[in-house]
Amino acid sequence: MLCADVFDRSISIACWVVVFSPQIIENFRRSSADGLSLEFLIVWLAGDVFNIIGAVMQGVLPTMIILAVYYTIADIVLLGQCFYYRGLGISESTKPPEPEAGRASSSSETAIQTVPSSERTPLLHNTPGGEHNGSNGRPATKQRRESLTSVASLRNHLTAVDGTHLSPAVPLRKEVTDTPPRPSSTFQIIAFNTFSITLVCAAGILGWYVSATSRKRHHKGDDIPKSDGTLQFDITGQVFGYLCALFYLASRIPQLLLNWRRKSTEGVSLLFFLFACIGNLTYVLSIFAYSPVCQGKNGRCLPGERQSIYGRYMAVNASWLLGSLGTLFMDLAIFSQFILYRSKDECNNS
């Protein structure tokens, strides 16, 4: 059982190390972070801050404290992407002024309306005020000048076409050379995600093996370190631990609501939540798989000592256990949204 908890913890650490990378890459690839809920990231960041404080005060493993700091930095990176793409990015910039081509097009439309439809159609039309032919002839002259200007604009617009298109050897429509990339099939997505998860889990197993081998090499026989069974219950650390769990649980709600309102998970990386699910699952298993080592001679336990150590260990880690279990179910709910809205996302990408 001792190997089981270390084994699960190693896989959990490997998943949590890379959990943010797929989403950061997805945002960079799309030049947008619209798929992520800003409230989701802010609440998650608050949970990570409380996680650091609670872990330090409770005295958990240094590895977990380092990971908590890493989570906080990764959250800040994701928040930075959101603020950049939504506030400073090109996608959110103001609408550019109307180009000259648009004005020429408008002039062309006006010219088309004023061009005579037949040889017998008069160039000058009656004005609403009835000033077709004034005593001094000024309105008629002015209207004729505007008509000639419109005809000239139409001539310039029509002659702007490249002369090479008049050749029968050159098609009028340019051949499309760059075809848009085809969306990945379901099989390709499953294969890529499976390969990525297998690779990360293999890295965690390799880390566990190297750690176990190094421990056996440096500690032989009775020199193997034993659990001291003196894990203390820190009230302040527990308060921050439960606050951390509360924020972790609440963080998923804005993302669930955003996906539900959009009826889409476009812009959200599936691997992001898959790694989160596996990381939480293996972390929970590592807590339950903890095997106490008593302080008696040759590691023998007194009656009830093993249960006492195990119960104290579970009580100390209860807040982190609650946060991981609750977040696991929330991530599974988001994962179900990927399946539910996949058909719509495929139509949008096609």
Image (cartoon, rainbow, N blue to C red):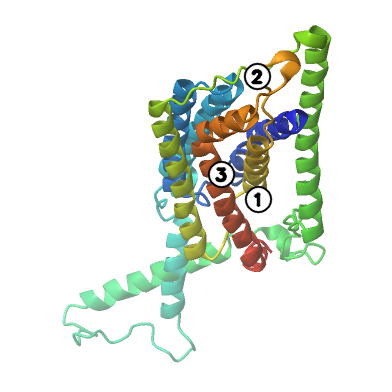
Work out whether 345 lies above or below 300. below
Q: Is residue 220 visible?
A: no
Q: What amino acid type is highlighted by mark number 3? A: Ser
Where does the image place residue 338, in percent across and percent down from the top left? 63, 59
Residue on which disc 1 sits: 270
Residue on which disc 2 sits: 227
Q: Residue at x 43, y 44 (%)?
A: 246
Q: Furthest residue to the left?
A: 135
Work out whether 278 lies above or below 103. above
Which callout, 3 or 2, points at the residue further toward the start of the chain? 3
Give the mark toward the camera: 3 or 1. 1
Left or right of residue 345, residue 132 in this image: left
Left or right of residue 129, residue 111 in this image: right
Q: Residues within 10 Å of mark 2 (few under 14, many from 20)?
A: some
Q: Residue at x 69, y 64 (%)?
A: 350
Give the mark toward the camera: 3 or 2. 2
Residue on which disc 3 sits: 31
Q: How many marks?
A: 3
